[in-house]
Amino acid sequence: AQTVTQSQPEMSVQEAETVTLSCTYDTSESDYYLFWYKQPPSRQMILVIRQEAYKQQNATENRFSVNFQKAAKSFSLKISDSQLGDAAMYFCAFGYSNYQLIWGAGTKLIIKP
Amino acid sequence: EAQVTQNPRYLITVTGKKLTVTCSQNMNHEYMSWYRQDPGLGLRQIYYSMNVEVTDKGDVPEGYKVSRKEKRNFPLILESPSPNQTSLYFCASSNFGGFNTEAFFGQGTRLTVV
C-alpha cells in the first residue's frame, strides 16, 4: 500500500527567509505524480506544485521549488523569500494510475514577521 | 468562474439524523471524490466517481453513501451520522485527461455530530 509521511507537524520561518518542508513516500509503482497543496485558514485547498515521477528535472513555480529524489522516495518543498501569505497547512500527496490521491498528515507553516 | 461548490459550509446535527452534503462542479469534470480531513491524519478518501452512475469506495467508506446521477453533482449522504463522523469534508473534481491534471476542491464542510 502507498503511504505518505510528513515528519514535521509544524515549522516556523522568519519572513523573507527560506524554508524546506519534508515529505517521504512509499510505493512500488514506477509511474506516479507528487503534489504539494496549501491550505490557508480559509480552508481552501490550493495546488502549489506538481512533479511527474518520470521527469528528472525538479519542478519550480516562482518562489516554490521541489527537491525530488526518486530513489530515496523523497519530495521536499522549498519556499524562498517567505511571505506572510505563505502561512498555511501544507500537504504532500501521491497519485497513481487509479486517480486516487494519498495524503500526508500535513505541516503547519508559521511565518514570523 | 470554474469552481466546486459545497453546501453547507457548517453543519451541526444529532446522532442518527440523516443528512446530505451537496457538491456541484461547473467544469464538466468526469472524476469527483469525497475526502474527510482529521487532525494528524491528512485527507482520506471516502468515495469517488469516475463518471455518471459509476462510484467506488475509497479508504474510509463505512457510514457514507454517494450517488452520481448527473455529471455535475456528487452528494455525500450520511444515513445515520455518529459522533466519529465529526470532521471536515471536502469534495474535489478533476478531468480524466491524465492524472497530472489538477484536482479542484470545494470550500469544505465542517460537520459536527452530537
Image (cartoon, grey):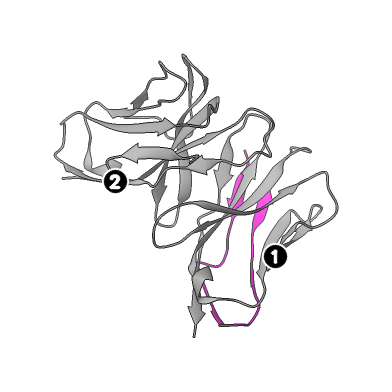
Which portion, as a residue range, is magenta? A1-27
Q: Is residue A60 left or right of residue A9?
A: right
Chain letter of the residue carrying label 2: B
Query: Which residue is farthest front?
Result: B1
Q: Is residue A21 magenta?
A: yes
The amino acid pointed to by label 1 is Asn
For disc 2, the marked residue is B9
Is residue B70 shown above or below A33? Answer: above
Is residue A83 shown above or below A62? Answer: below
Q: Is residue A30 left or right of residue A89?
A: right
Chain letter of the residue carrying label 1: A
Q: Position of residue A12 (x, y in %)?
A: 53, 78
Cα gap from disc 2 to disc 1, whole angstroms: 32 Å
Query: Can residue B61 be seen in the rendering of this structure?
Result: yes
Q: Position of residue A81 (x, y in %)?
A: 64, 78
Q: Which mark is residue A62?
A: 1
Rendered-image quadrant of the C terminus of chain B = top left
